[in-house]
Amino acid sequence: MLLWPLLLLLLLLLLPLALLWQQRSQHARWAWLASLQHHVAWGALGWAAAWQRRKLEQSTLHVGQSQQQALRWCLQGAQGPRSPRRGSTDMSTFRNHFPLTKASQAQEEDSGGQVPPATSPQYPGEASLQATLLGLVALNKAYPEVLAPGSTACVTLTSPWPSPLPWLGHALGRVSPTGAKDPVALLLEALRSPGLRTLEAGTAVELLDVFLALEADGEELAGAIAAGNPGAPLPGRAAELRQALEQGPRGLALRLWPKLQVVVTLDAGGQAEAVAALGALWCQGLAFFSPAYAASGGVVALNLWPEQPGGLYLLPPGAPFTELLPVKEGAQEEATSTLLLAEAEEGKEYELVLTDRVSLSRCRLGDVVRVVGTYNQCPVVRFTCRLGQALSVRGEDIGEDVFSEALGRAVGQWPGAKLLDHSCVESSILGKLPPPPPAPAPHSQVGYPPSHTYPLDHCLQEVSACYKSLRFRGSVGPARVHLVGKGAFRALRAALATYPLSPFPPEMPRVLRHRQLAQFLQRRVVS
């Protein structure tokens, strides 16, 4: 009986809308449709995000039960003699059947220089959906209007959102062309849109490559915009691009897009240097936000706080099953007993151990986190370094974070120097290749601009007592620094992406373990 009154009310509402529609111009109709589509999309997104937020609240409040469910899900596919008893999720039984294994980097070192298997740029699991939905809502709340129609452009073929929903980008009015397979087309479309408020890229290193390409090919891009390739000719916008490029890299993004507020990239290992370089030069004055931290092709942590600098992440209790391996500072022996999420202590550092349903192995990722707080019963962390990226010529074991600190100090002593990227190789990896004369004791070689040796060696001695002692005894020579040509690291990342075990997103290696990769970079040394 209620159907007829509802239909009558709908007709009464549609009549004035139809009259209004007839009076609108074609352009106004499309604008009205886009606005309606945007509101409907945000309504659906808000509902889905609220549902995911409730699920996250429940899982983090009852973290023990949530982890038991995650472990049970992972073990459902377990078969064979190593499988625990059916339905058993006892931690002792699980740990006995599945001992800890090293991450893929350790396997690569023993592969004799053979290259790894490519993983898909997909992030299965509920964590990726939560990261996308909750990240979009949190970003819009922290920076109002940054996701308004026509305010967002992605300038790389990959998206920073772990679960990119095709309908969502179109419904939210993004300027990026749908289904584009050419990165130049993405960049041109973004350059044609001066009103952007959000700039997206798959990762920070990919965005760094975009800005370097923009500087190198700026005149060609300006010519395409002026000629209307693609779209209508925009000679005024082309002139703005040329003028912005003439003023140098510092602050270029804000000169091109004066309303720009935030840069969105997906965080992963080896991205810190790229974020620092972008923030110091091209994206100076802009906020950076990553909706998640990805490792080995999967989402391992969520970012619910876009306004917090430096990246705060929540370790969720769902699949994949996550354990924490304590990192013992200054101890030679390694911890062998893992902890569950609720057992993490604030201020302590842990290596992440993941078990997924496919591999059924308790894999030590090498990613180290420091617990800085709690969200309900789950740890809130910052990612500090990767254990597999340590230099150890004579057992000095200089970690990624320690080396980066020393390198940052050294670069600060070189007037006009800007660190864009770097990678190291132990001299023994180069094998029979003749080292640059004179040939010192076993040492580390670093490739990055500019080329200086003494400041880096001195800074390494300041941050590492073990390295200082070995240098004093003459057991190791000074770290040798080399300048590599423009585009060397971009070519290195492109080469890494073609290797069979290459993770996604591509993690920039700070220490090259393969002779093949070391030779690849050495061929691009210019001094």
Image: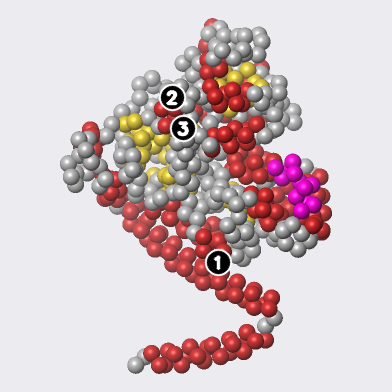
**Residue for badge 2:** 111
Q: Quadrant of the N terminus?
A: bottom left
**Residue for badge 1:** 171
Answer whether residue 383 is visible to the viewer in this image: no
SS class, disc 2: loop
| Left or right position of 371 against 451 | left
- Which of the two labelled residues, at mark 2 and mark 1, occupies the earlier sequence position? 2
Q: Residues within 10 Å of mark 2 (few under 14, many from 20)?
A: few
Q: Amino acid at mark 1?
A: Ala
The answer for how far apart the CA atoms under marks 2 and 1 are is: 47 Å
* Location of residue 466 in the rendering, given as x and y in whole percent from the top left corner: 50, 16
The answer for how far apart the CA atoms under marks 2 and 3 are is: 9 Å
Do callouts 2 and 3 mark residues in contact (Cβ within 8 Å)? yes
- In this rendering, the answer to whether 289 lies above or below 364 is below
| Left or right position of 353 against 434 | left
Along the viewing direction, whichever of 498 and 463 lies nearer the viewer: 498
- In this rendering, the answer to whether 244 lies above or below 34 is above
- Which of the two labelled residues, at mark 1 and mark 3, occupies the earlier sequence position? 3
- In this rendering, the answer to whether 96 lies above or below 148 is above
* Location of residue 505 in the rendering, given as x and y in whole percent from the top left corner: 51, 42
Q: Quadrant of the C terminus?
A: top right
Magenta region, residue range: 213-224
**Residue in the image at 49% along x and 59% along y:** 165
Q: Is residue 345 magenta?
A: no
Q: Amino acid at mark 3?
A: Pro
Q: Residues within 10 Å of mark 3 (few under 14, many from 20)?
A: some
Q: Is residue 216 magenta?
A: yes
* Corner quadrant of residue 53: bottom left
SS class, disc 3: loop
SS class, disc 1: helix
Q: Main secondary structure of the magenta part?
A: helix
**Residue for badge 3:** 116
